[in-house]
Amino acid sequence: MGWSPDVTEVKSWNEWDTLRHVIVGRADDCHIPPPEPALDAKVPEDSDMRGQWGRRPQETIDRANELLDGFAKQLQDRGVRVDRPTPFDFSKPAETPDWKTESSFGCMPPRDVLLTVGHEILEATMSYRCRWFEYLCYRDLLQQYYNEDPKMRHEAAPKPRLTDADYHPDYLSDKIGEAKRLEWAAAKHFVTTEEEPLFDAADVLRFGRDLVVQHGFTTNLKGIDWLQRHFPDHRVHTVNFPGDPYPIHIDATFTPIRPGLIMNNPQRRLPQDQRAMFERNGWEIVDAAQPAHNAPPPLCYSSTWLSMNVLVLDPKTVCVEKSEVYQADQLDKLGVEVVPVDLRDAYAFGGGLHCCTADVYRDGDCEDYFPKM
Ligand code: DAV
């Protein structure tokens, strides 16, 4: 049976099969959260965000929402079903018996929180205190899918304690310096400890029966082991990318476009020993094109490499941010139809085209793209 817009079904096994149903985030009420260990480690040392927090200016929220609504409409016009999250009051303090922080973050990047694997949508543990309750923004939708699709599995990973034991104290400084950060990243010394399983969904890429997971600031080895135990029929592969001084989320670093083709950030190359499984199975890893910008937009956590944070609509059609002309040109030369999407003024709210979406349904089944292990 093919997909029908009138029947809700959750299913997505990879990053490239034809997209039919997706969640697109919202910028409503988005906050710059107060300092906390894991977040501080990610905010670049020279960032304009250091030392300030609170609700983002309304005109920037309105502009980001205009772009996100436009992206949603563009997808709908192509026949994709689009759902949107329900924000809660992010200005309220987030508090558990272990800690309290003065605000939450927002719900622009559903990709960070929701991991769709086959018929399952899994809520990630997250690793920032300000994002502990973010899953609530998606509960209306997940409950609806659960009610409408008898095969849907709604799962949540164990909520982490996120006490100070989860964070390495030597990262609690804004004067570490890039050289030291790169040395630590290469040695896989990240801000999070191995106290308990931690992962963000955006550290995971889905390749059919293989999951590729980035070990970095937001995902630790216990989190990756948890994913392997949770998905026993999958092979889970741990990767890391030396060269990134602030390693969170794999989706501005390693971007599969179609079976056999991956773009890799040339400043964050996959180490040689980790390339073997791709090479043995005929996958080509190409350097991504340079970003079109020298700096991220104001008050943005992410690097300029959101240029490669693209959304694949099908193996021949990819959404690329409108101003990222070098990335568009590269994909065009690789034989892909590029759909330009205006989103740059929303980057500061949580990322690019891949970040601000989460798959609900793609065509295709669970295939083995790496038969030679
Ligand atoms: O390059 O700053 C951004 C990833 C967002 N999900 C970067 C990583």
Image (cartoon, rainbow, N blue to C red):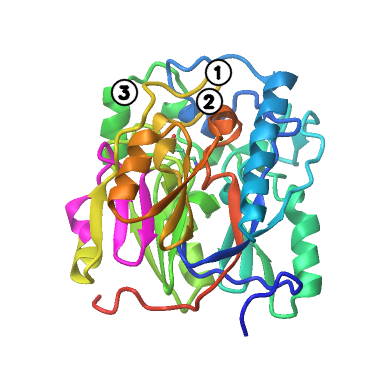
Whether label 1 touches label 3, CB < 8 Å: no
**From the viewer's perspective, is 271 left or right of 199?**
left
Residue 178 numbered mark, or none: 3
Q: Amino acid at mark 2?
A: Cys
Q: Nearer the viewer, residue 142 or 73?
A: 73
- Mark count: 3
> How far is the residue under mark 2 from the one under mark 1?
8 Å
Q: N-terminal of the two: label 3 or label 2?
A: 3
> How far is the residue under mark 3 from the one under mark 2?
18 Å
Q: Secondary structure at mark 3?
A: helix
The local crowd at label 1, few if under 14, some if 14 to 19, many if 20 or more residues have their Cα within 10 Å, is: some
Q: Amino acid at mark 3?
A: Glu
- Name the residue tied to disc 1: 49
At x 46% / y 79%, what residue is drawn? 233
At x 78% / y 41%, what residue is drawn? 87
Q: N-terminal of the two: label 1 or label 3?
A: 1
Q: N-terminal of the two: label 2 or label 1?
A: 1
Q: Is mark 1 within 8 Å of ligand 1?
A: no
x, y percent for residue 344? 53, 30
Which image quadrant is residue 291 in? Answer: top left
x, y percent for residue 205? 44, 58
The local crowd at label 3, few if under 14, some if 14 to 19, many if 20 or more residues have their Cα within 10 Å, is: some
Instruction: Look at the image and give the residue range highlighted in magenta.
Output: 253-275
At x 61% / y 43%, what residue is drawn? 109
- Name the residue tied to disc 2: 300
**From the viewer's perspective, is 365 left or right of 307?**
right
